[in-house]
Image (cartoon, helix red, strand yellow):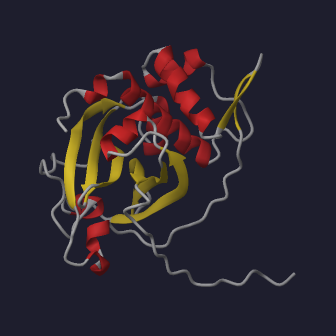
Amino acid sequence: MPVIDYLGRRHHRARLVRDVLRSDIIVGAWADRLLPSEDELAKQFDVGRNVIRASLNMLVQENLLRRIPGRGTQATSHIVVHQLNTLRAIAEGDEAGADLPVYEQLHWGPVSATAPVAKRLGVPAGTEILLWERLTRGQVPMVLWSSFIRSDLGLSAPDPHGPAQREGTFAFFESFGLDVGRAIVHTGAAQADEAVAELLEVAPGTTLLVHVRQTLLRDGTPIEVATGYHRPDQMVFVNSFERVKPPAS
């Protein structure tokens, strides 16, 4: 599929705004207050109201937001946070076997940090940052990743085909001398909207696994805020957890 200026299309702009708003909702940013007005959100994200309205409508359909007539828009859910305990790309594991995935780069380039993204990355609003979008592919697209990355890290554009086999996003960061320490990952599910469905080659409405990730250096500096859409018909996640007994009452 040729990818030509797809970010200029409204449903893709709405997708990126929706991803950031979902990220904020999941981490509890709007747990006790209404979201800003559509006009204020349009100003924060530097997009038109129609883009904001489309983004909010998608989150209403996901049951993460509800509209209260005469008052505004409110987060509906308390998200139970489950910590993941590993940090590696798909291709870095031995379980990938002989059929290693490949990476297809969709977009790499500078964008202006909107206020919500800037806050998560610890930079002033309006700072030039990087948007990196790529597909992880097996026989079909498996994962769509959208990353907002600080531009003061000394990174150069990756190979057009993305990271090499047995590498991934974290190895890419480390190839520039960055000491990646940890990532905070929230996991949930969402239905594929028109934009995500187009890139993952699934039907709109398909249920996907969603990772919302903030990657930090070992000193705690945030370097990436990312959203990953995973096709559940292509991937299974395995985690090993150590039992920590709660304190006796």
- Could you tell whether 140 is left or right of 123 in the image? left
**Residue 28 to residue 182: above or below:** above
Residue occupying image coordinates x 37% and y 30%: 12
Image position, residue 139 (x, y; %): 23, 60
Q: Quadrant of residue 45?
A: top left
Total numbered labels: 0
Location of residue 138 with respect to 96 vertically, above or below: above
Q: Nearer the viewer, residue 248 or 240?
A: 240
Quadrant holding the N terminus: top left
Q: Position of residue 235 (x, y in %)?
A: 39, 65
- Asked whether residue 124 is in view, the answer is no
Q: Which residue is painted at 20% across and 46% down in the image?
A: 105
Specify whether 96 is left or right of 160.
right
Identify which residue is drawn at 14% across, 52% down: 161
Answer above or below: position of 118 versus 7: below
Confirm whether residue 46 shows in the render.
yes
Viewer-proximal residue, 7 or 171? 7
Percent x, y of residue 87: 39, 68
190 and 127: which one is in front?
Answer: 190
The single residue placed furthest to the front in the displayed view is 203
Q: Is residue 53 above or below residue 215?
A: above
Q: State the quadrant of the C terminus.
A: bottom right
Farthest residue toward the right? 249
- The location of residue 96, given as percent across then percent down, is 27, 75
- Tell me which corner region of the image, top left, top right, bottom left or bottom right, holds residue 128: top left
Query: Left of 191 or right of it: where is 78?
Result: right
Q: Identify the residue at horizontal 63%, vertical 84% (top origin).
A: 243
